[in-house]
Image: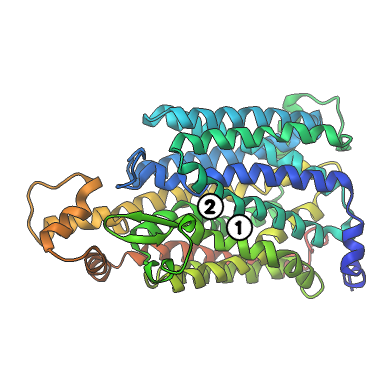
Amino acid sequence: MSANERIPFMEQVRSLTWPFWVANIMEMIERLAYYGVRVVIPIYIAQADEIGGLHFSQSDKGLIFAAWAFLQSILPVFTGGFADRYGYKRQIVASVILSACGYTLMATQREFWPFFFACMLLATGTAIFKPPVQATFVKSMSDKASGVGWGFFYMVVNIGGFMGPPLAHFLLGISWPAVFYGCAGLISLNLFWLFTYKSVDSGAARDTSVWDVVAVTAKNILNIRLLSFILILSGFWACFTQLFDMLPNYIVDWVDSSSLAAHLPGWMLSYNDSRGAQITQEWVINLNSFLIIFFVVHVSWFVNTRMRRLSSIFLGICMASLGVFLVGMNPSIWLCFFGIAVFSFGEMLSSPKTNEYLGVIAPKDKKALFMGYANIPLAIGWGWGAFVGGQVYENYGEKAMMAMRYLEQELHVTTLPDRSVAFDTLVSQLGRTPSEVTMLLWDKYDPGLVWLPFAAAGILSAIALLIYNRFAKRWEEMNA
């Protein structure tokens, strides 16, 4: 029986210190700004008919997100060690400055490569933010409260994530640049919170060089047991990140929420000539954050008393994969909501426990380093998922491309229209309503199949983790 089984919930909560809560607040602000952009940027970059959007291709979007994934996820592997060596607060300051500059440039650049550079700047700022913040609250809580502590962290992260979409929707009512400028201002608020607590000591040696830090980082990651765990999780992250990379475009293209939209306030809706009133995609996806806010702490506490961390991660990956599969079965808003809900509970079981597991097995003077390692599966999974997802969705899922294919193959149109007006052209050619044409394309091309590769990646990851779990029971340092 573990210590967590004998310690009441409120006693664990009372043991959490002020630096822990400040780290959570800073993480919430950073996530609010990040998701204020992240949940709408697939539409800004690649939605064919978005007014004021960049109108890049889905493949272009996939390339941007793949590079973003690699940079944002690989850098923390090294910057985690730098945070231990040079101090958590210094690295947070650098992160805030880089992120604010990234958001500002995204507001002003409309050509591919300048916009790409702005995204990479934001990715760099985000990358060096997480290790020192996460290490601050890992060092500020005891092992007895780690389950509840990580649950609170994940809840606070999702409060920021939940508030991001309505913030983006409000700022978008002003203009697209206002979305980016607003998020630049928000992230800058984190500089204030650094003055409210005494810096947490990492416990690491301060006389090492930059190259020593790199050497230690490389040496620890070559631990075959740790590396196996990291690689196994890559499939889960390939599945997870499509909720923010591909689902926004998929909802706008295919999911019909008109029946529900008739009963909701205008600030939750979007309007266009072809579809009428629909729930904005950011509010649909926001169900994920809404459920996590209300359930993740109690799910974490419940799981903490009943199963090992690795078992919880396995069950969560299975549920998340099922959720991704359900999202693509039908264009009904209700099935989309159900798939997101199943995915969300799978996320609650797996993602917080992944960070907790790495935090528990990490040596005392390498907490930030191991928090950095948590980003490697995200780099592999998100990078692969973004690149493949862009290609897959452009060729097999995007409604504008399906409309062009139908015009060419079925109506034998020789001069195809621009992608931005392809669907409207097909509606005009067929003399049917937009809803009828949407269902015609759905029945003919079955775009929901674009979710199958990602659901499969999640299931393969779960099977590999089940095998790892059996071996981990024999490894004292990994059995958690």
Of residues 478 and 201, the one nearer the viewer is: 201
- In the rendered image of this protein, does residue 139 appear above or below residue 197? below
**Residues tagged 2 and 1 counted as in contact (Cβ below 8 A):** yes
What is the three-letter code of the residue carrying label 2? Gly
Q: Residue at x 69, y 43 (%)?
A: 372
Which of marks 1 and 2 precedes in the sequence?
1
- The image quarter in which residue 293 lies: bottom right
Query: Badge 1 is on which residue?
Result: 233
Can residue 239 be seen?
Answer: no
- Residue 390 lies left or right of residue 49; in this view the side is right
Q: Residue at x 31, y 52 (%)?
A: 394
SS for dot 2: helix
- Label count reads 2
Real-space CA distance between mark 2 and mark 1, rounded to the nearest whole angstrom:
8 Å
What is the three-letter code of the residue carrying label 1? Leu
In the rendered image, which quarter contains the N terminus?
Answer: bottom right
Query: Badge 2 is on which residue?
Result: 381
